[in-house]
């Protein structure tokens, strides 16, 4: 796909993320795999003011175009692409319920079968490190080895998928799971969960289930 088309798709995904209530201000960031690197939103520019020329190319070594500043979180986007060859798009946000669970430093357990959309029986919570640092990207690399989404302690959420549309869909599904988890925690700390055997069944079914888009 041409760069201009991907850049426009990134901007539309950013705007849709805001419309869905998954992010605040300029806090989140979105990228797509491109060439041997990625295209990513710039730092500090409100989504509604973004133009395709402001989307930044970052190469495999972390170099970027002169005069353009990529998101401060480019390192963990890069590590997702390096760790997971199946990742084609990465969405990061500070969705309220995901962030609340991350503050508790808890993974989201298998409270609902949709947990399998992220590839396993839980959504992990990567340990805290200062935003934009190599240390944070290293925590992310561990967390997403066998998952398509992870919480970031005291920070937010990362989700990746095979397209921008699917990555945003997954981010929204995880936010719903986080909201459900917080609601059940308000009743009991001993939240019932589905057994691993059932999640294994659902994971198999999910090979032909989920958001279907033309890619």
Image (tube, helix red, strand yellow):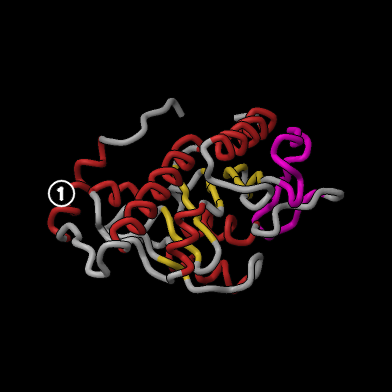
In the rendered view of the protein, which quadrant contains the N terminus? top right
Q: Residue furthest top?
A: 214
In the image shown, does 5 or 28 lie closer to the viewer?
A: 28
Q: Which residue is mark 1?
A: 201
- Which x, y percent locates residue 68? 81, 48
- Which x, y percent locates residue 4? 69, 30
- Residue in the image at 47% along x and 42% along y: 167
Q: Which residues are magenta?
A: 42-65
- Which x, y percent locates residue 175? 42, 49
Quick check: 42 left or right of 124?
right
- Residue in the image at 17% along x and 57% along y: 194
Q: Residue furthest right?
A: 67
Quick check: 142 left or right of 204?
right
Verify whether residue 13 appears in magenta.
no
Query: Which of the 4 quarters of the picture holds residue 3?
Result: top right
Q: Main secondary structure of the magenta part?
A: loop
Classify 129 as above or below 21: below
- Which x, y percent locates residue 60? 64, 56
């Amino acid at each position: 796909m041409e760069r201009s088309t991907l850049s426009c798709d990134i901007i539309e995904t950013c705007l849709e993320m805001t419309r869905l209530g998954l992010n605040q201000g300029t806090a989140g960031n979105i990228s797509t795999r491109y060439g041997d690197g990625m295209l990513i939103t710039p730092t500090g520019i409100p989504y509604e003011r973004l133009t395709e020329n402001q989307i930044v190319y970052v190469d495999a070594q972390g170099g970027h175009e002169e005069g353009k500043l990529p998101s401060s979180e480019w390192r963990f986007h890069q590590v997702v692409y390096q760790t997971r060859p199946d990742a084609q798009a990465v969405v990061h946000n500070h969705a309220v319920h995901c962030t609340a669970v991350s503050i508790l430093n808890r993974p989201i357990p298998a409270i609902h079968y949709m947990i399998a959309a992220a590839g396993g029986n839980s959504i992990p919570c990567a340990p805290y490190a200062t935003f934009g640092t190599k240390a944070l990207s290293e925590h992310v690399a561990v967390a997403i080895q066998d998952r398509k989404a992870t919480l970031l302690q005291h920070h937010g959420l990362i989700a990746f998928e095979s397209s921008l549309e699917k990555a945003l869909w997954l981010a929204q599904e995880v936010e719903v799971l986080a909201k459900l988890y917080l609601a059940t925690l308000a009743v009991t700390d001993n939240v019932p969960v589905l057994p691993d055997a059932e999640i294994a069944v659902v994971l198999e079914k999910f090979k032909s289930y989920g958001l279907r888009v033309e890619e």
